[in-house]
Amino acid sequence: MYEYINGLITNITPAYIVIASRSGVGYRLYTANPYRFEENVESHVYVQQIVRENDISLFGFIDANEKALFNKLLNVSGIGPKSALAILASADATGLINAVENNDSAYLTQFPGVGKKTAQQIVLDLKGKLDDLAVENSTATPATATNDSRALDDALEALLALGYTKKDIKVVGEQLSQTSDSTDGYIRSGLKMLVK
């Protein structure tokens, strides 16, 4: 139903962003990494609406390729929107495409909600179907680096919202606390540690 929304990003949380359209409506968009967007900046966000029996949700994407990859992942049996977002959050789409093309189900099982059977299903369903995607890393401008613990706390909350366990997040948090970065940077670094 929706293709994209142009508007002002008015709120960023660990699981979603709120974008106020020019008509005055604020939309909650669940995203893979909300901190790739910048608050109080006019943005062009691609949108996918998912309707379930008792829920209607909107999912936001940096570009059309990210949205297309999300939809391809949803076509895999056993992958829901939350698992698809967790896979997309790993800023390494090339790694995902290579894993699918090389039958590397071990790489895919590192994502939350993806077991061995689901990883094999991803390979089976998507092999040869991802060549048309030239998914780039974020085109949005992330927040500037800071040593504020709030950026790290927000990043860890975002990883939790993606489905990673508290135990894994605690280990990653201890390592990330030794560095200074933006929330987006912490999330990207944390994902690299979680998806080896």
Image (tube, rainbow, N blue to C red):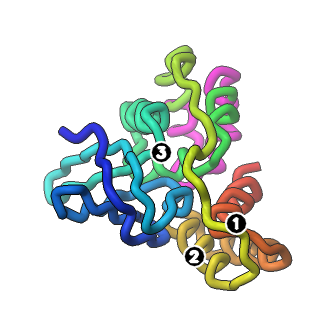
Marks 3 and 2 close (CB-CB < 8 Å): no
- The nearer-to-camera label among 3 and 1 is 3
Image quadrant occupied by the N terminus: top left
Query: Residue at left 50%, top 23%?
Result: 126
> Is residue 49 positioned above or below 168 on the image?
above
Question: Where residue 40 sits in the image (x, y, percent)?
Answer: 43, 67
Q: Residue at x 46, y 38 (%)?
A: 63
Q: Earlier in the sequence, mark 3 or mark 2?
A: 3
Please identify the quarter of the rendering in which residue 109 is found: top right
For disc 2, the marked residue is 154
| Amino acid tagged 3 | Ile
How many numbered dots are placed on residues in this image?
A: 3
**Residue 181 falls within the magenta-colored stretch:** no
Residue shown at 39%/71% (left/top)? 11
Does 18 sit left or right of 164 as displayed?
left
* Residue pointed to by mark 1: 186
Q: Secondary structure at mark 1?
A: helix
Above-or-below relation of 173 to 114: below
Residue 140 lies, in percent from the top left, at 55, 50
Residue behind mark 3: 62
Magenta region = 99-121
Q: Amino acid at mark 1?
A: Tyr
Residue 115 among those drawn in magenta: yes
Q: Residue at x 53, y 24 (%)?
A: 133
Are the residues at dot 2 and dot 1 in contact (C-beta closer than 8 Å)? yes
Is 44 situated above or below 121?
A: below
Amino acid type of disc 2?
Asp
Residue 96 coordinates in the image, percent (x, y): 63, 34
Query: How far apart, in angstroms, are the residues tagged by discs 3 and 2?
Result: 19 Å
| Residue 69 located left or right of residue 179 | left
Q: Looking at the picture, tell me which residue is in the foreground, 145 or 72.
A: 145
